[in-house]
Image (spheres, rainbow, N blue to C red):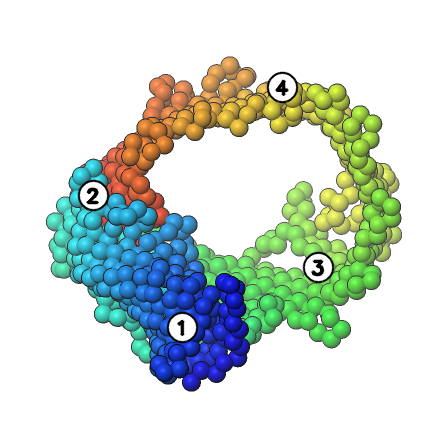
Amino acid sequence: MIKFHRLLFALLGIGLLCSFAMASQRIKLRGDNIMYRENHKELVASSNASLVLKDMTVRGQYFVLNTTTNILRGEGDIYIEKEGQDIYSDAFTMDLNANTLELDAMDMTLTPFDTTHNIYVKAEAMEDKDGITTGKKGWVSTCEYDPPHYYMAADNFIYEPNKHLIGQNVNLHNPVFGVPLGFWTPAYIFDLGKRQVVYLMPVMGTNNSEGTFFKSTFDYYFGSDKYGKVYVDFLSFRGIGLGAKHHYGLGDNTEGSIYQYGVSGQQDRISEWDQTVALSDIWDFQSTLKSRDMYLINGGRTQGDSNLFELRKDDLGDKDLIQYKSNQNSVLDSRNRSQSMIYQHDSNDRKEWFFKFDQTETSRVDETYTLNQNHRIAHDFDVENNVFLQRNSLVADPDTFDEALRTTTTLRKKIDEWGTSTTELSLFFDIDDDRVTQDVTTYVQKLPESSFHFNPIKWNNITFQETITVGNYEEAFLQPTTGTIRNFRAQRYLFNQSASTRFEKLPLNSALSLRFGDDQFIYSTGDENYKTSFATTYTTDWWSFFQTQTQYDRSFIPEEGQSPFFFDERDQLDLNQIRETATVYWDSPQKYKWSVSTGYDWNLEEQLDYKTEINVQPNAQFRTNLKTGFRIRQNIYDPLSLVSRYRARKDIDLSLFANYDLNAGELLFVSNTISSTLGGDNWVNRWWLKAQFTYQPQVNDTYQLQSLSLIKDLHRRKLTLTYNKLLEEYRLTFSINAFEDDSIGISTNKVESLKVEGVFDDQSMDR
């Protein structure tokens, strides 16, 4: 029985809203006119009637709700919006108790998540129950015309949102230039998630491994938990290949797939079993087993198996993962094995625990063990611990191995008013008992290191920053001259301060940025050093045709200063360098400009290399870039590179790339691409042409066509003829724009003299 929460009547076209609860759901019914028929127990909404139920909105001209049976009927230009679907119908019937929806003459628009193109579905009748849609006498197409240029018709269909669209007794009507490129199949499954099948066209052709072959696939569907594919192949050199991939569901908690394929009378086989079990509301278990002993199209064999076992928990952001993977594979003469094990625990988007064991074996065995811990403890301290163990050895000599252990502990605390405090303890252990000598080159241990980074302070237009670091370090360094390892330990105190500012809108339309830095290094050995640095960039824009940029970097290190460590030498280098860039432009720097840059290094007492660049882009249709340089020390020019593109209107696109050796005075390489639209804007006459040419005098003295594609627009579809010189391949393919990666066609190349192909699942060509 309906329980009314609100009933408002309005006059002169002002809308009326009726809100009530039914079948444990809240319903909102609107209409310009609403009346209640007491004798029939019916609530009638007419003229701009609408219904809101959970995530579904229904609009129409006339709604009748029986308050006894909870059945709602609607007529007249029905429009339904549900979970991103647009559905049109002549009439509908909704059972609010059973949560079912029946439509007459349904017209629906879908947009799967992996494409921006619409899919249009029509049916004489449709029923929606518990999120699964079934229909009769329906068709599907990506063509919005009525009637469409092509479509797939089915006597019955089932639609599971974002999962499957299944048709039964299916016919494809797809004329291309009057040629019927269609087929019939008793069942057809279109995967709206990760698409695996588009057309069930067979693959036909010939190659050196299989001889003349014919590979076909048939879909079957007995329910959302019982569907799959059957593979039937005829291979003149090998025999008959048979296989099947069956998807199954066991109750509400288990789903999986089994794949078997083999060639009669041969050792060729493939086996796969994938299964996911929901152990509870928060625990899932997945297992994947694969085994393969199969020939390769280009010769040889591949053998191996792989296993995956994964246990997952997700309890409102509290997540756990336990995973084991193994793989062994042999391709031709190459053999390898690997295995790994992972445990991970996440809480509140923080990876609190992580452990991984990883082992790979080829001619050598490499093992790594990783343990990470990350927690927040009292008073908002972040604590991280990292342990990394690596072990490397040769398969032929397992007793000789290199083994090392690294550990790092970091304690971090953010103090809002002041800054961030960090303490790090890092250790290194060479634990292979000198089985491998001189296997350690350089490492640094922090025993420990503490730093405090103060929050930036802004005063007027100046930003001040400061960091204080105190640490006890132990360094091992392989000295190249003696071949011995130097071990050294000492304390270091580092004080880093900087101030930066920037000035805009200066005379000559200029801007100036400045940065001053001071680093002080103090060591417990009595050594000390400091580095004073200054960096500035000054840009100008004179008279609307001339720009300059001056960059100057200076760091001063006193001659008497020194560090007892090798690892921080790179932080204590003297620098005294200026680089000047001058740019002449016309109209704007984005349209026409020529820039030249060079500089001087006072430490090396030499001029910096020249670099020059020309940009021409008068409009959106044309742009050209020329770039080269001169290396002063080597006394040679950099290759002159040219990149150019010209778009004439919207039907011609020309691009050119070239390299020229200015030293030898010879052309190194030229590549250009021509793209054109032929036949105008109407799809009936429209063609696309694209060709790529190259010229490389050192390899071949002829201007060669590398690839060519000719595409005919078939409205939401296209027919493509391609040529590829590298593969020595000709290919004619047909595809739908919404799924252009999936095509059917015919090809010939240097490996296969002829092949007629469709789109199958991931392992279609070699099963």
Image coordinates of residue 596 in percent, x first then y, are 67, 22
Q: Nearer the viewer, mark 4 or mark 2?
A: 2
Image coordinates of residue 343 in percent, x first then y, are 51, 71
> Relative to residue 29, is residue 628 drawn left or right?
right
Mark nearer the N terminus (2 vs 3):
2
The residue furthest top is 665
Q: CA distance from mark 3 to mark 4?
A: 45 Å
Secondary element type, mark 1: strand
Residue 445's disc is 3
Mark nearer the N terminus (1 vs 3):
1
Q: Residue at x 31, y 61 (%)?
A: 90
For mark 4, does the 10 Å Cα neighbourhood hold few (<14), some (14 to 19), or many (20 or more) residues? few
Secondary element type, mark 3: strand
Q: Residue at x 68, y 66 (%)?
A: 409
Q: Quadrant of the N terminus?
A: bottom left
Question: Residues at badges 4 and 1 in contact (C-beta under 8 Å)?
Answer: no
Q: Is residue 430 above or below residue 94?
A: above
Mark nearer the N terminus (4 vs 2):
2
Q: Nearer the viewer, mark 3 or mark 4?
A: 4
Mark nearer the N terminus (3 vs 4):
3
Residue 44's disc is 1
Residue 175's disc is 2
* Disc 4: which residue: 635
**Amino acid of disc 2:** Pro
Question: Residues at badges 1 and 2 in contact (C-beta under 8 Å)?
Answer: no
Q: CA distance from mark 1 to mark 2?
A: 48 Å
For mark 2, does the 10 Å Cα neighbourhood hold few (<14), some (14 to 19), or many (20 or more) residues? some
For mark 3, does the 10 Å Cα neighbourhood hold few (<14), some (14 to 19), or many (20 or more) residues? many
